[in-house]
Amino acid sequence: MTDTHAHLDFLEPEELAEATAHLPELRAVLTLGVDPGRWEKTLSLAQGNVYAAVGLHPTSAHLLSPEVEEALRHYARSERVRAIGETGLDYYWTPETRAAQLKALDFQAALAEALGLPLVLHVRSKDGKAEEDLAAWLLLHRPKRAVLHAYGGHPALEAAGLEVGAYFSFAGPLTYRKNAALREAAARLPEDRLLVETDTPFLPPEPFRGKRNRPHYVRFTLEKLAEARGLPFAEAEALTDRNARVCFGWP
């Protein structure tokens, strides 16, 4: 199993110890540092089968400055960094910073392209406007390798993602009873575009709703993906592991 999106730096010491104890169950974990104060710790956690991504979350886009840009360039060149992000558009928490979010997104997309790294994309809004804007951005900029983190099933984003060859990464909400439409999306998307993640410590799968997530809980999302596609668990595991390896370039 592979968890392509976690925030290990958000875990309390006892939670991190538990997560670390379960790492042998996983082929790889990508832990993401999403603001300047978290990049150093994120890189310190990127050992063994844990790899790192560094970026500026859209809710922190207002922090972008020449100094932050230079620091991100520095951290992004670490040999343990396998992606840039997460970046993107968040109109749920910070709709007032749309212009700053787009500027930060453009900078990180250019950095990812310059370094030959995937770009991990976050999107959230109450009315679908951020999803529509990100879909338009994808079609305009056409990043070489984009990952739609915690994919939520928005039709415009699905169409744009397919056109540019993006990866669709499913998280705990795939397991929620109400999300039948999301499971239908998981069933119809091309198998070589599928990833699974936890977003640890957020978005726990159904058996752990209301609790804090862990990377090894990705099993529950993977089980639901396998069920949606009518596959044995081992086959779904193999294809998502393979997709993650191709996308992020780890062994």
Image (spheres, grey):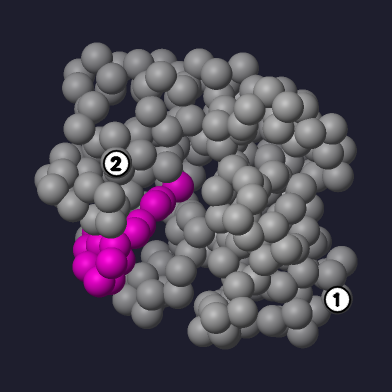
Seen from the viewer's position, the closer of residues 32 and 106 is 32
Residue 239 visible in rendering:
no
Which residue is painted at 79% across and 44% down in the image?
27
Residue 50, given in percent of the width and then of the height, sits at 70, 32
Which residue is painted at 35% across and 34% down in the image?
56
Seen from the viewer's position, the closer of residues 151 and 178 is 178
Q: Is residue 183 left or right of residue 23?
A: left
Quick one: SS at disc 1? loop
Picture disc at residue 232:
1
Residue 157, given in percent of the width and then of the height, sits at 36, 70
Which residue is painted at 46% across and 23% down in the image?
38
In three-dimensional space, the C-alpha distance between marks 1 and 2, rounded to whole angstroms, equals 39 Å
Residue topped by disc 2: 59
Picture disc at residue 49:
none
Q: Quadrant of residue 11?
A: top right
Quick one: SS at disc 2? helix
Q: Is residue 129 left or right of residue 29?
A: left
Three-letter code, disc 2: Thr
Q: Quadrant of residue 240?
A: bottom right
Q: Is residue 17 above or below residue 240?
A: above
Q: Which of disc 2 and disc 1 is earlier in sequence? A: 2
How many callouts does the rendering have? 2
Confirm whether the magenta stretch covers residue 94. no
Q: Residues within 10 Å of mark 1 (few under 14, many from 20)?
A: few
Q: Is residue 123 above or below residue 99?
A: below
Q: Is residue 247 left or right of residue 72?
A: right
Q: Is residue 195 left or right of residue 73?
A: right
Residue 7 visible in rendering:
yes
Which portion, as a residue range, is magenta? Answer: 120-139
Three-letter code, disc 1: Pro
Confirm whether the magenta stretch covers residue 130. yes
Residue 172, given in percent of the width and then of the height, sits at 61, 61
